Image (cartoon, rainbow, N blue to C red):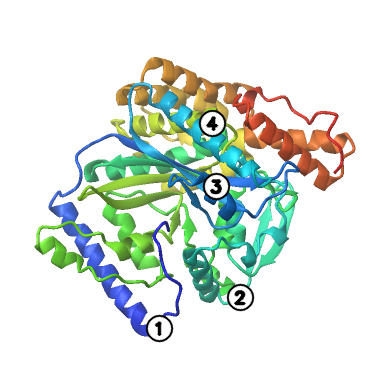
Amino acid sequence: MGEKVVAGAFDLSDRQRYRDKLQKCLKGLERLLEEKRFDRPRNLMGLEIELNLAGADGLPRMLNGQVLERIASRDFQTELAMFNLEVNITPHPLGGRVFDRLAEEVRTSLAYAHRKAEEVDAGIVMIGILPTLERDDLVSSNLSDVDRYTLLNDQIVAARGEDFTLDIEGVEHLVCTARSITPEAACTSVQLHLQVTPGRFADVWNAAQAASAAQIAVGANSPFLFGRELWRESRPPLFQQSTDTRPPELQAQGVRPRTWFGERWISSAYDLFEENLRYFPALLPICDDEDPLAVLDAGGVPRLGELVLHNGTVYRWNRPVYDVADGVPHLRVENRVLPAGPTVTDVVANAAFYYGLVRALAEESRPVWTRMPFETASANFDAACRYGIDARLAWPRRGRHGGLAETDAVTLVRDELLPLAEAGLDAWGVEAADRDFYLGVIDERCRRRVNGASWQVATFHRALEAGLPRDAALAATTRRYAELMRTDEPVHLWPVGVPQKVGTG
């Protein structure tokens, strides 16, 4: 959805033309795959982080236009709502001291952005869901002033034909309605990109799907929404419900939601793009003048603009990406499961765990997806979102007898997945100092059973016990979180609670 689009009305001919162009694009992708036109292996990784703007009081600030004007960098962009920003980090080859370099770049970028935000009484907060958000903050009037967001909102609302229902039952139960997709903006995420060759794509995507539950278990950081304590990682149910184009009748028929985990392991990148066309109607039927098949016939590389735009409106947690750089097409797996934060060190540790684990899982002689039903991977993902660091996950047993065993997520990560991640980072050529430091952060989270979500919840309840009203406790938790975030001490070292000087205002 980073493309510039212009709002306007669509008629039946627009939709038919777009459908035809999508099929041409899919045929073009198929030809590119058959003709082996894709980029050589480059081991490139990329990182995007969505951010919140909040004031010194911990409350959201609807000021992204003013902040971006002051930042004046193409690395920072708008996101869906006025309290959101996104920072994009230049792709890096995996290897050497890449994670230390990445951490330093992110720290520098966020510190600069924070200084600029302070000029308008705001600040950068890197957190999955800002605990102080209220329903009145997430209304269509607070959408960013960008055509593509208005247009996307209008099309999803029109497709649904009625208000959105948010119904999330966790520690507490939230039920409310929304008249726009703006509640989606509460979800701020980290997106990890990995450029892969077509031959490796399916193995990497399958591995990323299998790894997603462990990523969430150790990285959950979104336990609150609208003042309620819900799932330890509440972004997935919120994102699904706030973008759901299906009225209840279509849900009852089993029509797939646009935000989903998926339903099967794949054998090719083509499988995912084809599913996206087969299952999901177009939301933004905007066509360009390119004839992708004619471009291919002339020996060129098509942009496949309609396919790329449609793909951006299907919200898989591991999304296939087609792109062209310097005239050469490539494929990426975009891992979207992680929340933002808590610190730069934590974000980079999450990235190191992911890239190492995915490499190792993708290259196993007996891959995990041949030993575990897809439904188990999906159930693991839900369990990790609900329970975070305390989740129990099913995983294939080691040894010849096979089958699945259920175990604590922290035990699975420490005993099996961290050694795999270590081997994967070695295979990427990452230096031992980088590998050991960042995987050590994950190990310590597991050993202490602490992640961003557990810290937020413990600190919030400590504030309640100290006599703060609920709203004040959430605001105090947010302020303390922002303060500790800027120390860059990883979250497992954060003291629980808010300083006694914190008042009720």
Is 289 situated above or below 375? below
- In the image, which disc is placed on residue 162? 2
- In the image, which disc is placed on residue 70? 3
Q: Earlier in the sequence, mark 1 or mark 2?
A: 1
Q: Rounded to the nearest whole Å, what is the CA distance between mark 1 and mark 2?
A: 21 Å
Q: Amino acid at mark 1?
A: Asp
Q: Residues within 10 Å of mark 4 (few under 14, many from 20)?
A: many
Q: Rounded to the nearest whole Å, what is the CA distance between mark 3 and mark 1?
A: 40 Å
- In the image, which disc is placed on residue 429? none
Q: Which residue is mark 4?
A: 344
Residue 310: x %, y % from top left: 37, 64
Residue 458 horizontal side relative to residue 465, left or right: left
Q: Amino acid at mark 4?
A: Val
Q: Amino acid at mark 2?
A: Glu
Quadrant assignment, res 58:
top right
Residue 79: x %, y % from top left: 52, 54
Q: Earlier in the sequence, mark 1 or mark 4?
A: 1
Q: Residue at x 46, y 56 (%)?
A: 315
Q: Nearer the viewer, residue 212 or 286?
A: 286
Q: Rounded to the nearest whole Å, what is the CA distance between mark 2 and mark 4?
A: 40 Å
- In the image, which disc is placed on residue 11? 1
Please, which residue is most extreme toward the bottom here? Answer: 12
Residue 461: x %, y % from top left: 80, 37
Q: Residues within 10 Å of mark 2 (few under 14, many from 20)?
A: some
Is 337 situated above or below 502? below
